[in-house]
Structure formats: structure tokens, C-alpha cells
Image: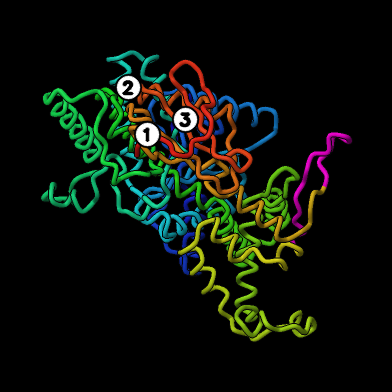
Amino acid sequence: MNTMTRPVDGELLRLKEEIEQYAIDYGLDFHPVVFEMCDYDTINILAALGGFPNRYPHWRFGMEYDQMYKGYAYGLQKIYEMVVNTNPCYAYLLSVNNTVDQKIVMAHVYGHADFFKHNAWFKNTNRNMMDVMANHGTKIRRYMAKYGQGRVEDFIDKVLSLENLVDVDILFDKTDFSSNVSVSDEVDEFTEDEGVSGPLKSFIRSKERWNNKQKKVGKKEKKVKKVDFEKLPTRDVMLFLLEHGPVEEWESDILGILREEAYYYLPQRLTKIMNEGWASYWHSTIMTQKAARPSDIIHFADHHAGVMQMSQKRLNPYKIGIELFRDIEFRWNSGRFGKEYNDCTDMYIKENWDKKCNLGRQKIFEVRKTHNDITFIDEFFTKDFCERMQIFTYKHNPRTGRNEIDTRDFEAIKQKLLQQLTNFGSPIIRVESANDNNRGELLLRHIHQGVGLDIVYAAETMKNVHAIWKRPVNLASMDDGKEIKYTFDGKEMKVVGDSSGGGQK
């Protein structure tokens, strides 16, 4: 498979410079963007690898590549572009796209690049991840050579099942995600911190983890480690297992590597609707007002309509995002916000309300800086917007075998949408005790916020946690208003009844 890319040149380079200037003129601000051309096989490989060509080998990347390849071959999907949140940003263009598509994609990429740089949830992102990912790949390949590919890959499988058990608040803690050492601690250790690359820091962190474990071994520490209970509860399950699990040096390093990568991708998961909506808003604005020639309009409209098409099965983040940004711009341009507007009961006056505030563009730049998808939907997904967009929920009717409208009620629709976005639709799990039942057992608790447990997935996850913790793993949850406790002892998952009064914490 050819994984080579080449820089844009000729007419495409001229178009890139033209569209970049349009983006700057509109007030977008971004790290330098490097566009690379590639064929469809290469972009499938890059997409399967999350945009990083030198990642560690793993079967899931091959599976994702195979799915993308078949989707393209059968005409079910097509990747037009891909952009990586680094400095500089790397963006991959599909070589077979026509000129209009390339202009749309470039404008779209500059929207993403601006969002990556300014949204608060990306504030502490490591922008040198291209090199860090390559360093991770090198280390994991060495472990595979030393301990066997099957053994290392099996451990990676177990850790990857925990990558959604993360703590969103840590994104604001200025954490070096390759360890539990903060940036302020690094400055004391590295006298020339600015000259220390991300990969080198990651390497030094792995050495520190190994040295710390060796010191503990030298002290003949018991298998059941003492845990600082002041740090519990915690939602950062991966960090907890890294620090307190009875894992080997290479396993500890892989836990740190995969945790670092999980936190790198977390802001993108938190802002999918906003990020795609912002990029779509700007590709639409730049194309319709600046970049599109008269002969481009029909093709642009066809391409844009395809991207914005809504599905009966799920909300299209491109469509919801762009329409919400447009709605915010319209409302703040016309003054449809604040107490006076909200208190108005005359429907005619309200329908024709226009205070000519012209604050719309300023407002959407402000919103793109401070919000994530949940706060974006919670604050700006209004009843008027819902009705105008004709959004309603579907429900499968087993009698007819079809999806049918379940409700048009705005509050029910908004609540369901927020539930789907809360923790990405996954249950919220935290570590509560490392000495449950006073036997060194791990106690996890399911925090019920509208997302219930899928017992099949829960059992598999507990099995993987047990493989790392090497002692029984307990999970407390709610069932029909009662607290219930599950346990996995290494052989099977069992219900042990009411968990009130639980283990020692």
C-alpha cells in the first residue's frame, strides 16, 4: 500500500494561498496549515490511523481501513479531507477531487484550524503530537519485539476498552498526559524547557515510571498497594491503574501512552457538532461570498447539500452545527436575545423583531471559543430553532417494522439530545475504593446521569480491568431505583445484591 503524500503545488497552491487570505480577512486565526495530496488508498490508511502515519501497529487500524476501503469501493462513503490538530496543522486532500471540491475542503480546513487554536477545550492540547505519536509507535514496536506481538497487542486491547473512562475536567489542569506530572513541575526539572520536545518528555516520563517502580520493588512492597484515598473518587481510571495497578514496566508505559492519546482526542469528541458546524459555516461563507466562480455554484450547491443532508437515524453534526451558528448570528444581529425580547408576548412584534444590533459575527466567534457541544446545545438549541428545523425523535415500531415519529415535544427532544451527548452516550464510571471489602478489591461506581449500563459491555470491561488490577473488581450501580452491586472475580460476573454500606473506602 502506498502511504506517500506530496505537497500541493501549481494551481492548487495558488488556490490555497487565495482561500487562506479570505479566511484571514474574515478574522479566522490559525496555526500554519500544511496541505498534502494523496490518493484514496492513502487517505483511508491515514483516516484509520487517526491522521498520524507513524502510529503503533494494531489490528483495529487494519479493521477500520478495511471498512473504509469497502465503503468507498461500494459507493457508500467518500472521505474528502482530513485535518490533524497539530502545529502546523496537517491537512490531507484527495487527489481525484475536482477544483471546486478542493476549494470547499480548503475553506473547511481553515475553519477547523481556527477552532483547534481558539476553543477552550483544546487549550492544553499537545500540538506536537505528530512526533509524539511516532515516538509512541517506536516504543510499542520495541515492546512487541521483546515480549511478543500477541502479548502486547492483547494488553493494548484491554487498555483501549477503558479509553472512554476519562475525566473531562483534567483538560483544564495543564497536565502532561504522558504522566501525572504537571507542566509547572516540568519547568523545575528541565532548565531549558522550551527546548525539550514532546517526544523527549514522553520518553523521560516512561523512564521515571520505571525508576519509581524499581524503587518500590527494592522496598519489597506488598502486592496490594496502599492508595492515597484523598485522591478518590476519580474518573481517570487509566491513570489510577497506571499509578496503583500491579503492572510491569512495559505495561505501565503503554497505559501512559494510550492515556495520553485518549486525552488528545477527547476535545474533538467533546466538540464534534461545534467543530464541524464552525468549519461548515466558513466553507459556505468563503465559497458563496468570495471563492466560488459563477461556474462553480451548481457543483458547490450539490456538494454542500450532500454534506448537510439529515439522516433518519441520527442528527448530522455538520447540519445542526452550521444552522445553530447561523441562528445565533441572526438572533444577535436582530437583537433577539435578552430580557426585553424574552418577555415580549406579542407574537407579531416578536416575529418582526429587529433592533439592528449587528452583533452576530462577534457573538459566534465568542461562542466558538468558550463552549463544547453540551453547553452549545443547552444554551442555543431553542424551541423556535427546533420547530424551524423540523427536528423530532424517531422510535422503531415493531408492528410495522419502520421508524416512526415518537415525539415533537421540544423539551423531550432537547433532553434526549443532551443525554446522547453526556459522556458521548457512555455511562460515567469512577473509582471509589482500592480496598473494597477490606480485601484490596477495586470498587467502581456508575454515576447515573440518564445513561444506563449495558451489562454485556460492563462485564467485558470489568474483565479487562480485572486483568490489569489482578484482584476482584466490583461495580455499584442503580437498578429500578435500588443500588445493586456486581462483582467479577476473574471467572464470572455475579450480582452480589444491595451495595449500600459497601466496602471500606
Dot 2 crowding, Cα within 10 Å, few <14, some 14–19, many 20+ = some
> Residue at (54%, 44%) from the top-left corner?
81
For disc 1, the marked residue is 258
Distance CA(mark 2)–CA(mark 3): 20 Å
> Residue at (48%, 21%) from the top-left corner?
59
Say above or below: 179 vs 185: above
Distance CA(mark 1)–CA(mark 2): 14 Å
Residue 176 point in image, percent of width and height: 28, 46
Q: Amino acid at mark 2?
A: Arg
Residue 393 magenta-drawn? Answer: yes
Sequence-wise, the earlier of marks 1 and 2 is 2
Residue 179 point in image, percent of width and height: 27, 40
Q: Where does the magenta region start and end?
A: 389-404
Residue 49 magenta-drawn? Answer: no
Q: Is residue 103 visible?
A: no
Q: Amino acid at mark 1?
A: Leu
> Residue at (28%, 29%) from the top-left corner?
253
Sequence-wise, the earlier of marks 2 and 3 is 2
For disc 2, the marked residue is 141
Farthest residue toward the front? 501
Q: Is residue 174 left or right of residue 21?
A: left
Instruction: Look at the numbered disc 2 and give the secondary structure of its residue.
Output: helix
Say above or below: 283 vs 312: below
318 and 462: which one is in front? 462
For disc 3, the marked residue is 161
